[in-house]
Image (cartoon, helix red, strand yellow):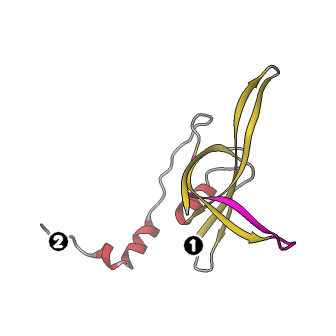
Amino acid sequence: MSAPVTLTGRLTADPELRFTAKGDAVLNLRVVTSGRKKTDDGWVDVDTTFWTVSAWRQMAENVANSIQKGDAVVVVGKVKSRQYDDKEGNKRTVWEVAADHIAADLKWTTVNMQRVERSTVAAKQQDDPWASQEPTPF
């Protein structure tokens, strides 16, 4: 089961881009989020959470070429839990975000947009029989 989430935070490390055996790009990154609270001594961070975020295919490549450690980002996606056994054999649960969208947070930075060449998308559509058929008139 998954739940929708929007994160605003900063990258704790440069994005890690890899490719599957089939050639699909997959990106992993860590985002830290926290709130701010005013105290008598000034502002302090509260509710700090570190998130593991994954992105696939063209978005993964675009993100890897666009952001780096320390950049402010906005991530929209779905939170999913994953269980594994640690080295001592204990069951652990981690929460990860499967990204639908990742962008620079324009509250803190400016961006010069550059459109991505879509030749790979067009090539994939040629293999898709539904994409290559002419629409039928009504």
Residue name at image x 87 percent, y 72 percent: 88
State which quarter of the image contains the N terminus: bottom right
Q: Which mark is residue 119?
A: none
Residue name at image x 62 percent, y 75 percent: 20
Residue 29 on image: x %, y %? 68, 57
Residue extending farthest top:
40
Residue 75 visible in the snapshot: yes
Q: Nearer the viewer, residue 51 or 122?
A: 51
Residue 102 visible in the snapshot: no
Q: Which mark is residue 136?
A: 2
Q: Amino acid at mark 1?
A: Asp
Q: Secondary structure at mark 2?
A: loop
Residue 8 vertical position relative to residue 41 in the rendered view, above or below: below
Residue name at image x 57 percent, y 72 percent: 24
Prevailing SS of the magenta stretch: strand
Specify whether 46 is left or right of 105: right
Residue 43 vertical position relative to residue 62 in the rendered view, above or below: above
Q: Secondary structure at mark 1?
A: loop
Q: How many marks?
A: 2
Name the residue carrying label 1: 24
State which quarter of the image contains the C terminus: bottom left
Residue 106 vertical position relative to residue 77 in the rendered view, above or below: above
Residue 61 on image: x %, y %? 59, 61
At label 2, counting other C-alpha atoms closer than 10 Å, the crowd grade (few under 14, some 14-19, many 20 or more) is few
Residue 54 on image: x %, y %? 62, 61
Q: Amino acid at mark 2?
A: Thr
The span picked out in magenta is: 86-103
Q: Is residue 118 one of those drawn in magenta?
A: no
Residue extending farthest left:
138
